[in-house]
Amino acid sequence: MSLQGKSVLVIGRSSGIARAIVDAALAEGARVTVAGRDAEKLRQGYGDTATAETVDVTDDASIQALAERVGSLDHLVTTASARARGLLKDLDRDSLLKSFDTKVIGPAMLANRIGDVDDIAQAAIFAMTNRFLTGVTLRIDGGEPLT
């Protein structure tokens, strides 16, 4: 299966893991929309290679508005999180719960080495182009090799 002509929404910043996934999806021929809190920064980061949208993943109304603007999608990838920051003793319960309610993708341990953003991007491309894989959430943790 190819990403040629498929619509992909990537929620995250214009650097790191999100950037690697966007670049890989574009290289596979996808039409990519990027979304984050600051659409202008996304426009600056991606130029005219991807359409930029605004979304706050901690606000249900913002997520709904993005869904209405973007419409039908073939794939959605999110690297966004609402991390609780600070010393644990200083964090309030709502901040912690909000942090746990959003998805977090981190670096992977692959083949006795620390994975990099390209490893994660390739795993996302694999998930988007494999007809047999139908999972909703892909956990890219490096894990143990199958062989």
Image (tube, rainbow, N blue to C red):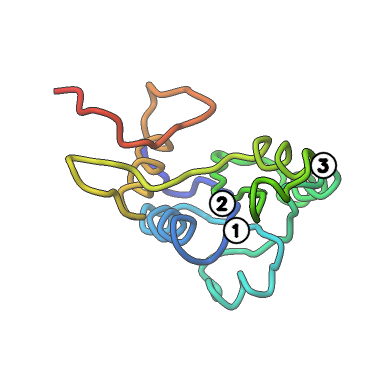
Sequence order check, earlier mark of 3 and 1: 1
Q: List the residue tagged with mark 1.
A: 34
| Residue for point 46% across, 57% down | 22
| Residue for point 34% across, 43% down | 108
Question: Regarding mark 2 in the picture, which secondary structure is present there?
Answer: strand
Q: Quadrant of residue 85?
A: bottom right
Residue 141 is tagged as: none
Question: Regarding mark 1 in the picture, which secondary structure is present there?
Answer: strand
Q: List the residue tagged with mark 3.
A: 60
Q: CA distance from mark 3 to mark 2?
A: 17 Å
Q: Is residue 80 left or right of residue 94?
A: left
Q: Quadrant of the C terminus?
A: top left
Which one is in front, 128 or 54?
54
- Count neighbours of disc 3 (C-alpha within 10 A) and say few if under 14, some if 14 to 19, many if 20 or more: few
Q: CA distance from mark 1 to mark 2?
A: 5 Å
| Residue for point 44% across, 61% down | 16
Q: Quick check: 142 above or below 63? A: above
Sequence order check, earlier mark of 3 and 2: 2
Residue type pointed to by label 2: Val
Q: Quadrant of residue 47?
A: bottom right
Q: List the residue tagged with mark 2.
A: 10
Q: Are marks 1 and 2 in contact (CB under 8 Å)?
A: yes
